Amino acid sequence: MGVGTFFTSKLDEALGWARKYSIFQYPFVTACCGMEYMATACSHYDIDRFGAGLPRFSPRQADVLFVVGTISHKMAPVLKRIYDQMTEPKWVVAFGVCTCTGGFYDNYATVQGIDTIIPVDIYIPGCPPRPESVIDGLMKLQDKIAAQAQRY
Amino acid sequence: MEILAELQRRFGDAIVETHDRGDLTAIVARDAILTVLGHCRDDVALAFDVLMDLTAVDYLRYPGREDGPRYEVVYHLYSIAHNHRLRLKVRLDEDDATVPTAVALWPIANWLEREVWDMFGVRFEGHPDPRRLLMYEEFVGHPLRKDYPINRRQPLIGPAS
Amino acid sequence: MAETARQEFMLGEGGGTGGGPQNLHVGVGPAHPAMHGIIRILTELDGEVIVNADVEIGYLHRAFEKDCEQGSWNNAIPYTDRLNYVSPLINNFGYASVVEKLLGIDVTERCKYIRVIMSEISRISDHLTCVGASAMELGAFTVFLYMIKAREFLWELIEDVTGARLTISYGRVGGVKADLPEGFAERTRKAFKDTREVLDEVHRLLTGNRIFMDRMVGVGALSREETIGYAITGPLLRAVGVAYDVRRAQPYDAYDRVEFEIPTRKDGDNYARYLVRMAEMEQSMRIVEQALAAIPGGPINVDFEGRPIDPATYVDQGKQGKTEGLLLLPITLSPNLQGQQRAALDRVNVGDKRVVLPPKETAYGSIEGLMNHFMLIMEGYGIRPPMGEAYFPVEGANGELGFYVVSDGTDRPYRVRCRPPCLPPVAALPRMIAGEMIADLVPTFGSVNMIGGELDR
């Protein structure tokens, strides 16, 4: 190993650094949280500062899936399909408490947390989360992206 | 109040009951509902041109009405010209929960009746498109009925709880 | 439905080999880039022209009506926030008003004005979002950024009053959660000045813009008869020339004491809807300014010369050692804090112990107050309207927002029905887009202002 290990880890770091600042997100906006998502994406809070300013509305071009808002059982297959269509590497952010646990919608129509359907990397609770906590969640995701083993 | 008196005069026994507690309300016999709705829309003095809302109530657990007719279909009418409102109700038994459709009178009745079918299982006779509106086709039962438990989930994918 | 879905992307409906032109079926949504909101539109295309369309909704159905039946009457208020989540304050007040109608109570004068002010601020933020988002979908991204900026000014005001930006739960049966904070009027005037500048800029960018008008004028039009037949209210009805507005037709709260115009247009197309919304924002600001001038009851915290004191300033002065005379000032907490004194609470809530929670001062200070608090909170107690039913309409941002409630005399609603103002236009969407190009779907859908929470409940 020796030299090889040294070399690989450095490349990993460089790739992680590059990846964390070039987040192409797919905002899967369904409900109220979308309003806070808009607020976060616009000039006041400006997530472009974190390299995540450009939403791609096609799962094939995106690497972070923002699930923004309540997912109902009717919507669940759609979400799963979009997740499957995304190419690796991909990450998922559960935006808002409905996506984390179902929130206060404990009823026949609502999925009790999207992690019952797809894997989730970062949970941002709040109903809806304030833009500050969204940015905090985004930074945590960046740390995760930078620190993990990179596949290339 | 004149509206209710006028309806009673014209339709007699078809108007089962009227009251004016907050809103003008008339309970109409099921067979006459289309005629009454049509008259309300077309009569110049009434001119209820907007079907503001169409919904239903399940009276299964309502004190004093456990044995009576289970459902009530509720029509809220509004007249732009005269700026007045009227509520019409039809009572339905559990084993014969069917009402004639009002799609011919107002196109919006199409979706509102689909929603009532979806949520309560009340059938609208002659409806051109009797599908569910909000839930998915695979869903079994009618969630707003009082005997449907609120967290009985029927997921399409994923675990049931 | 499943059958229809399978036809998607298949050429034609018939055998396929037979001669003659065939129509293409394209499904748009539920997750589509040009649509804010989840809805599925199945279109049948002849070339680029939409021959037929079918709309499927329900992707955001989260059992609002069933959830409301589970808790007490006031517990439904957070659920109403999430109906039309762009203007939640109007939903709060609409629901509170219908329960008040059932109980036969009349809220205080100051509360009525507060409801008017907060409703109108909410309406402006709704229209800003609608116009901004539909402009963005036509490529005018700048407008979107500007309008969200303006919305942020208003949300700061809302946060100031309610403590939250979006899901505010500010209404209560019998009043509102808390009084307006000190200095609210000045901050509102400042925010409106900034908002007016933004609206001016947007007018310069859009109204009369060639590209924008080409996409909007004459597109998505609906006749007056069909609009009424589909029970469409609000800006879409006013865009066909019917001046129906619940605030004028059946005035509630303090709307009969403020002057405003009902903007109408004749054409009923997307451009007319855009103009109506833009004009309504100006009218809403006018209403708020009048209401702020007329609202009864001045500041609660005043010094001996009658000047209002901000509690925060009081604390700051004390910390800086400037204590001269401070001890004698009748200073209290900000009227906006929830654990407030009786004086602040009484001005915005009716004096009815069956309905309104006692102020914290009383709840913690006397046994009667504590009992009153428990009687309203405990399971099986709480607000108990008499048996019966009531319908109460308010003017939501998208049209008539009505609540129909049935009470069985217990502390829980027996049935809560919301008449969603944006369901009728979505039901009429196939009629609006039939015969137009598929690209016209985008501005038409934008002008309908579909809000999932309200549409699917």
Image (spheres, coloured by chain):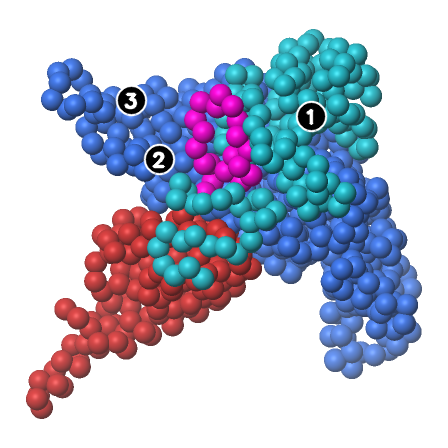
Chain colours: A red, B cyan, C blue
Cα separation between marks 1 and 3: 41 Å
User: For residue B88, which numbered disc appears in the image?
Assistant: 1
Work out whether residue C156 can be spotted: no
Instruction: Residue at 67%, 30% (x, y): give it.
Output: B91
Work out whether residue B104 can be spotted: yes
Q: Amino acid at mark 1?
A: Leu
Q: Residue B55, position in %: x, y?
A: 61, 34
Which residue in the protein does label 2 denote?
Answer: C1
Q: Secondary structure at mark 2?
A: loop
In depth, the one of C385 and C145 nearer the eye is C385
Q: Chain of mark 1?
A: B
Q: Amino acid at mark 3?
A: Val
Query: B14 left or right of C221?
Result: right
Residue under disc 3 on the same chain as residue under disc 2? yes
Pointer 2: residues within 10 angstroms few (<14), some, or many (20+)? few
Which residue in the protein does label 3 denote?
Answer: C49
Which residues are drawn in magenta? B117-135
Instruction: Residue at 50%, 32% (x, y): give it.
Output: B114
Instruction: Residue at 50%, 26% (x, y): give it.
Output: B110
Q: Chain of mark 3?
A: C
Query: C285 left or right of C379?
Result: left
In depth, the one of B125 and C249 nearer the eye is B125
Pointer 1: residues within 10 angstroms few (<14), some, or many (20+)? many
Rendered-image quadrant of the N terminus of chain C? top left
Residue C176 is covered by the magenta coloring: no
Q: Residue C125, position in %: x, y?
A: 57, 44
Asked whether disc 1 touches disc 3, contact meaning CB atoms under 8 Å apart, the reply is no
Cα separation between marks 1 and 2: 32 Å
Q: Secondary structure at mark 3?
A: strand
Secondary structure mostly seen in magenta is loop
Depicted C132 relative to depicted A23: above or below: above
